[in-house]
Amino acid sequence: MTTAPELVKQAKQAVGKQAAQWVESGMVVGLGTGSTAAFMIQFLGERLQRGELQQVRGIPTSFQAMVLARQAGIPLTTLDEVSEIDLAIDGADEVDPQKNLIKGGGAAHTREKIVDGLAKEFIVVVDGSKLVAHLGSTFPVPVEVLPLAIVPVMRALEQLGGEPEIRMAVKKDGPVITDQGNMVVDVKFAEIPDPASLEMHINNIPGVLENGLFVGLAGRVLVGEVTDGQPQVRVW
Ligand SMILES: O=C[C@H](O)[C@H](O)[C@H](O)COP(=O)(O)O
């Protein structure tokens, strides 16, 4: 019998594959982070190896994306070297009906917001479990914080109505440390009636680098679902 995690994996694979099909020769592509974006990177690399695409360059949003892209044979570039990003393809932890997102389950949201936000189009790739009626209903808001400011920032996040918790590492004692050397605080909010305002208020706290609310940035959303054993992708 196919298990639920296996079905989710198939859904992620299907959206990753479809998104990779939308890359064209000559494009500069923002390479997202996470398990869904990882499939896109793999399939994009396969297209390059087959010679279907020429002169594609990737801008990774994390150390993980950089390593995967190198393994897949995708030439990389940096924000210093390009004048624009044609397309960014990235996952999400929650997507609301207005296509606002929570990202940062992999602690990569700071670089993701820079790269995804600069792209002419930002395509979101998710499995169906990520669709929510209201942001914050299944996932806290990740906030990247300079370590020296962790205590005052957590106090300020409480004053905004949140319940902050420092994200702890799994295979290391102590906190998760981001690619930039900072800490991540996950903040649970009972409700987020105005994501744009909350995004701004969190980022106004001194010591906060960036938070995982992505408001008004997403273009098309690819949603993967497995129906009757068949992976399906709908474009929204
Ligand atoms: O920091 C990580 C990113 O925002 C990911 O894109 C997000 O957590 C979704 O990851 P996944 O595709 O593994 O669910």
Image (cartoon, rainbow, N blue to C red):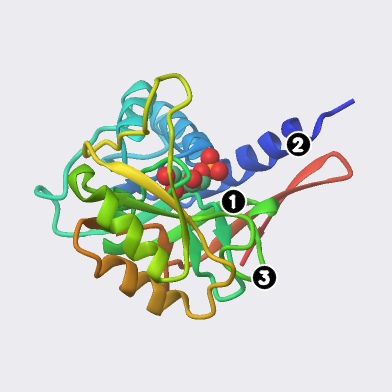
Q: Is residue 234 left or right of residue 20?
A: right
Circle 3 residues within 10 Å: few <14, some 14–19, many ≥20 = few
Pick the residue in front: 20 or 142: 142
Instruction: Name the quarter where the N terminus is drawn.
Output: top right
Residue plotted at (40% across, 20% down) = 172
Q: Which residue was labeled with disc 3?
A: 133
In depth, the one of 14 and 195 nearer the eye is 195
Q: What amino acid is labelled 2 in the image?
A: Leu
Q: Earlier in the sequence, mark 3 or mark 1?
A: 1
Quarter of the figure with residue 137: bottom right
> Where residue 117 sits in the image (x, y, percent)?
31, 63
Q: Amino acid at mark 3?
A: Ala
Q: Amino acid at mark 1?
A: Val
Q: Place residue 156 in its image quadrant.
A: bottom left
- Give the vertical position of 111 relative to 83 (above or below): above
What residue is shown with label 2? Answer: 7
Question: Which residue lies most toward the left here?
Answer: 80
Q: Which mark is residue 126?
A: 1
- First of labels 2, 1 by sequence position: 2
Give me the residue at 33% from left, 25% from top.
67
Mark before the other along the chain sequence, 3 or 2: 2
- Residue 162: x percent and y percent? 47, 64
**Of circles 3 and 2, which is in front?**
3
